[in-house]
Structures are given as structure tokens and as C-alpha cells.
Amino acid sequence: MKIITSIFDLNKEIKNYKNIGFVPTMGGIHEGHKSLIKASQNKKRKTIVSIFVNPTQFNKKDDFKKYPRNIQKDIDILEKLNVEYLFAPSVKDIYKFKAKKFNLKKKDKILCAKFRIGHFEGVLNVMNRLMTIIKSKDLYMGEKDYQQLYLIKKFLSKKFKVRINSCPTIRIDNKIALSTRNKLLKKRSLKKASEIALFLKKIKYKSKFQGSKLAFILSEYKKELEKKYNIKIDYLEFRDEKNLKLNNFKNKYRLFVAYKIDNVRLIDNY
């Protein structure tokens, strides 16, 4: 595996390749990331994994500083997976050139965008820069952060003529979604998060039969979870898969949740 840290060196290395799969990450490589890498490799694509902890998508400087980092461990994992390229640029290198800034409209300021002001503008900004540099026609992303996936499809897929390959969320024992942030949780909180995941999966299952009636009492489930597990839930909502509008249960939909436990914010969808 070649480790590349500058845009200049990356351009020189990949300029003659057209069949490249791109997996953007912020490090902390886990089974979820591995599934994206393998999806790219299964298509016989040379695969580039980026590791870049993007400062512009964090609402607090402390969160950015505390974000789990272990680059050597990540390198060891990626080498075992036979990844061709790791792109690990500096903040200075990524933000040294001018690029379009994105502003979300009111209709997009829902779910996490409502509670994390400027977060997705930061995500779109850095993804716009990374995709400008790498020029891959195949991007691989997980469905755990479904809103991020939706916004990148909406704002960037046409611009770069890129195929965004979405991969199912990978879970621990079919419960809590894998996330780098899980490393910040205490053991008892991980157990709670697993119980919450099972509870929410049951709600999603019930919704197939109770539909709008269940949506009406979702606020009661929210209070129940907050009280039982001593957590703060930002949102618990059924939304349409295609456009993220509040769901009418006629189209495909998902149950979206975000909550804080041990002062660590977790997101998921079912």
C-alpha cells in the first residue's frame, strides 16, 4: 500500500487510472469501513481510502480534539486488506485552494442539520474538495449516516458525475451500529446503546402494521427511552428514504434517531 500525504503526489500517482474506488473516512477503521473497501475491491477497482479528520464539520473544538485517532493501527488494517492507496493529507493541504461553499436551505435543516449547525456544510465542503482532488467515478459510503449520504448525493453526485454506492450499516451482534465514536463510550453505556437499538428495531417492525398510529405516539416512546436510560434524544422520527420528508407510510421509510449518552452523540436509522 502506498501512503500519500500531498495532493501533488496523489495526482502524479493516479493520473492514468480511470477505474478507482474512493472510500472517504476519518480513521478509526472498523468493520463498517472494511465492508465499503471490499465492495470497491469486488468491482475490481483500485481503491483509495482517505483518512482526514475534517475540522470544519465539528461544532466544538473539543470534539475535534477528542475524536479518536490511531493512524498506525489504521495503516496496519488497510495493509491487511490490500488497499492500494491511503491518502492522509494535512488540513493545510486540503484547504489551500478555493472551492465552492455550500449553504443548506430551510427544507434541508432537519434531523442532524437542525441540531448541528454548520456540520453538513462542513461535510459538503470537504467532500467537494476531496472529490475534486481524487476524481473517482465510484464513491463508497455507509448508510449509518443516512442524511450525510442523502446530501452528498443531492449536492455532489451530478457535479462530479459520480456513482455513489451505499452499503448497509454494520452492527455489533445485530444491535448498535459500528462507529468510531463508540470508542469514547464506557462499557455500561455500550450495553445501554445496544438495548436502545433493539428497542428501536422493534418500533420499526411495529410500524409495518400500525403506521401513522405509531408515528403519533412516537413522542411517548422518546420520553420512555430518555427516562429509562438517562439519555437526551435530539430526534426520533419516521422519514421518507427518498427525500427525507416526514413519512406518510406509503413509500419506503426509515426511523431516524440521534441521542447523547456519556456526552457522546450517537446516530442511527432503521
Image (spheres, grey):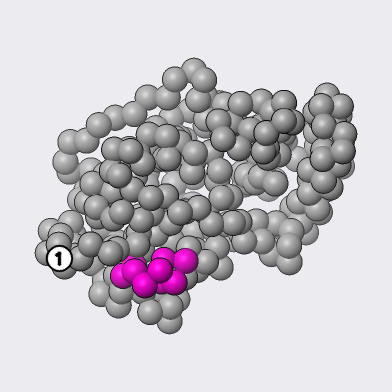
Left or right? Give the position of 82 relative to 66: left
Estimate the x, y position of residue 141 in percent, counting from the top left.
47, 53
Write the residue at 28% across / 55% down.
Answer: 136
Name the foreground residue: 218 vs 260. Answer: 218
Q: The N terminus lies in which quarter of the figure?
A: bottom left
Does residue 70 show up?
no
Left or right? Give the position of 196 relative to 265: right
At label 1, the amino acid type is Asn
The single residue placed furthest to the top in the displayed view is 106
Kind of element beneath mark 1: loop
Vertically, is 142 above or below 57? below
Estimate the x, y position of residue 160 in percent, counting from the top left.
28, 43
Write the residue at 69% across / 28% down.
Answer: 247
Name the foreground residue: 68 vs 98. Answer: 98
Residues rendered magenta in the picture:
39-47
Q: Residues within 10 Å of mark 1 (few under 14, many from 20)?
A: few
Estimate the x, y position of residue 69 in percent, counting from the top left.
44, 61
The single residue placed furthest to the front in the displayed view is 250
Residue 122 position by quadrant: top left
Write the residue at 15% across / 62% down.
Answer: 15
Vertically, is 128 above or below 163? above
Does residue 42 show up?
yes
Write the residue at 70% across / 56% down.
Answer: 176
Residue 44 position by quadrant: bottom left
Estimate the x, y position of residue 52 in percent, counting from the top left.
35, 55
Residue 168 highlighted magenta (yes or no)? no
- Which residue, given by chain and number where applicable, does mark 1 sit on? 16
